[in-house]
Amino acid sequence: MIELYYWPTPNGHKITMFLEEAGLRYRIHPVDISAGDQFKPEFLAFSPNNRMPAIIDTSPADGGEPINVFESGAILTYLAEKTGRFLPADVRGRKTVMEWLFWQMGGLGPMAGQNHHFGIYAPEKIPYAVNRYVNETNRLYGVLDRRLNGREFITGSDYTIADMAAYPWVVPWKRQQQNLDDFPNLRDWLDAVRARPATIRAYAAGEPYSSRPAVTEEGKKILFGQTAATSAGP
């Protein structure tokens, strides 16, 4: 059983997408990040960066004690190795998947996240910041669009954890002030991943939490006002 500590954000969706694709049994433990659940001591015990998602694998492959994993890229890699799926075994194929996984973790996710922050949540609109992250998101969309030219998925004909990592960060393209008509290969890929039954199930799993109220002003203080002192929990 995979105990999944989750909230329906792009990083959270990555993990439910894998779990649904692989048919692994899992149980969701909601971590309401606007309410500060990520600072609870019991969560910090295995997710020290006070971020979700995180998992506890109660039945690890070595048959030993439960294994905790935090950081979405590490979780995807762990689950792929556990199941032997969505990550090639050969050195060249694995290398390519890991390149694009790290591309998402180091580029698309952080840049799109700052795009969301300055475009939607910031108390004042700073044109330089908005333009900086909208333009960088646009550049990254272009990188992915070119990569997908002539390919069904990011690394070729096989669906991998690289696709699962990138997809949820492109879903909110309108919020990121992008036009998918400018990226036809990316648009076709997005449609193909969206239509996968496991993707549909994964997003459905988050619907009970997606209906919660939008981020409140108090929630913004919790999400965006963290320092070394506050992120240590109460």
Image (cartoon, rainbow, N blue to C red):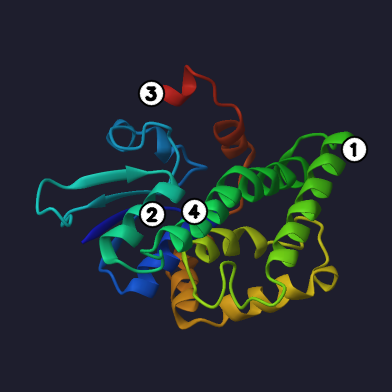
Q: CA distance from mark 3 to mark 1?
A: 36 Å
Please rate how many residues cluster around mark 3, counting C-alpha atoms within 10 Å: few if below 14, some from 14 to 19, many from 20. few
User: Which of the 4 quarters of the picture holds residue 191?
Assistant: bottom right
Identify the residue at image location x=76%, y=40%.
118
Residue at mark 3: 234
Q: Secondary structure at mark 4?
A: helix
Question: Amino acid under label 4?
Answer: Met
Q: Secondary structure at mark 2?
A: helix
Residue at mark 1: 127
Please rate how many residues cluster around mark 1, counting C-alpha atoms within 10 Å: few if below 14, some from 14 to 19, many from 20. few
In the image, is 182 to the left or to the right of 112?
A: right
Question: Amino acid under label 3?
Answer: Pro
The answer to whether one can see residue 79 in this image is yes
Mark 3 or mark 1: which comes first in sequence? 1
Residue at mark 4: 98
Q: Contact, CB < 8 Å: mark 2 with mark 4? A: yes
Mark 1 or mark 2: which comes first in sequence? 2
Residue at mark 2: 77
Foreground: 91 or 110?
Answer: 91
Identify the residue at image location x=32%, y=45%.
69
Which x, y percent locates residue 158? 49, 75
Mark 1 or mark 4: which comes first in sequence? 4
Question: Amino acid under label 2?
Answer: Thr
